[in-house]
Image: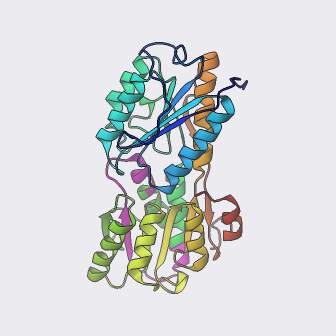
Amino acid sequence: MGRLRFPVRASIVATAGLTLLATGCTSTKSGGSGSEESGGQVAIGLVTKTNSNPFFVEMREAAKAQADKHGAKLIALAGKFDGDNQGQVDAINNLIAQNVRGILITPSNSSGVLGAIEAARDKGIMVIALDTATEPADAVDATFATDNKAAGVAQGTYVKASLEGRKPSVVLLDGTPGSTVDELRHNGFLEGFGLTEDSPEIKGTAVTNGDQTKAQTAMENLLQRNPGVNAVYTINEPAAAGAARALDGKNAGKKGVVIGSIDGSCTGVRNVRSGKFAATVMQFPQKMAEKGVDAVVEYAETGKKPSGFIDTGSQLITDDPAPGVPSKDTAWGLKNCWG
């Protein structure tokens, strides 16, 4: 792909709940080329679920760096919290008004943003989902994401194997209802573990919104009702950290409560190394952001659009490998982690 060459470096506007933290973006008339009033500079919108989750911080920083390389301008917006659908709708409308050439979005609710996405595409703005697919998937031009079903399967397969024949007593710490990521990881875990929603081995579930404090409270409540829990599914590493804190160090790998997770942050990998988690499945948010920015720039240059689902990869990380479950150790993880 040829790069645009402009003398001006990219600027970034980051918001929490659409409150400006910095300035530097130039509004343009809706319906134009997205570059006419900014000296030819391509404007790219990024809408994440939150500004605080390290995963989305990494994604935003990678998108900015890639936009810099292309001489493009990144405008980064976010919801106030994971699940803030209206905040994301407002962000998309904000970006439409700024006449961006493309929007990259990690939808909090996979169907709740469809009207705003349709409005953007009707204006000729390319929309790409990052990390989280829309429902239906073809509501956007393409999706760059982890194969979350496969990541869930890897987590479930490993957690079951780590019980080494012990009778499973499982709790599920889910994320945010309405998100395809949550559904795919949850279902993948069950498949990898060999469970169904009605399996008696499942002793409880809780919605955590991927938040550590909520996960800790949920885990404490689940443990009061089911003190014999020995396996924990978590939607992400903050939820896993909450579960580990509730267990107060009693999750000594295969000898105690086996916590599996998904994310691949450097903090998460260190928690695996220290034994707080048994394993995590690493994702690559940098790849999602970089590929998304590249696609918008190519669209601005040539009109070419990507389509369908593009898997950005995943990798199980553990220092206690299980037979038949492919994994890398935490030394590898720390070289490839994010955040």
Measured from the top left, where is residue 140 in percent x and y? 45, 30
Q: Quadrant of the C terminus?
A: bottom right
Relative to residue 141, is residue 161 depicted above or below? below
Q: Quadrant of the N terminus?
A: top right
Q: Is residue 336 left or right of residue 24?
A: right
Residue at horizontal 38 percent and vertical 62 percent from the top:
211
Measured from the top left, where is residue 54 in percent x and y? 51, 56
Along the line of sight, which residue is nearer the eye, 292 or 14?
14
Q: How many marks?
A: 0
Relative to residue 222, is residue 333 depicted above or below? above
**Looking at the image, can residue 311 be seen?**
no
Measured from the top left, where is residue 183 in percent x and y? 39, 52
| Magenta segment boundaries in residue numbering | 160-185
**Looking at the image, can residue 87 be seen?**
yes
Measured from the top left, where is residue 71 in percent x and y? 65, 28
Residue at horizontal 47 percent and vertical 12 percent from the top:
32
Q: How is the image coloured?
A: rainbow
- In magenta stretch: residue 119: no
State which quadrant residue 245 falls in: bottom left
- In magenta stretch: residue 168: yes
State which quadrant residue 28 falls in: top left
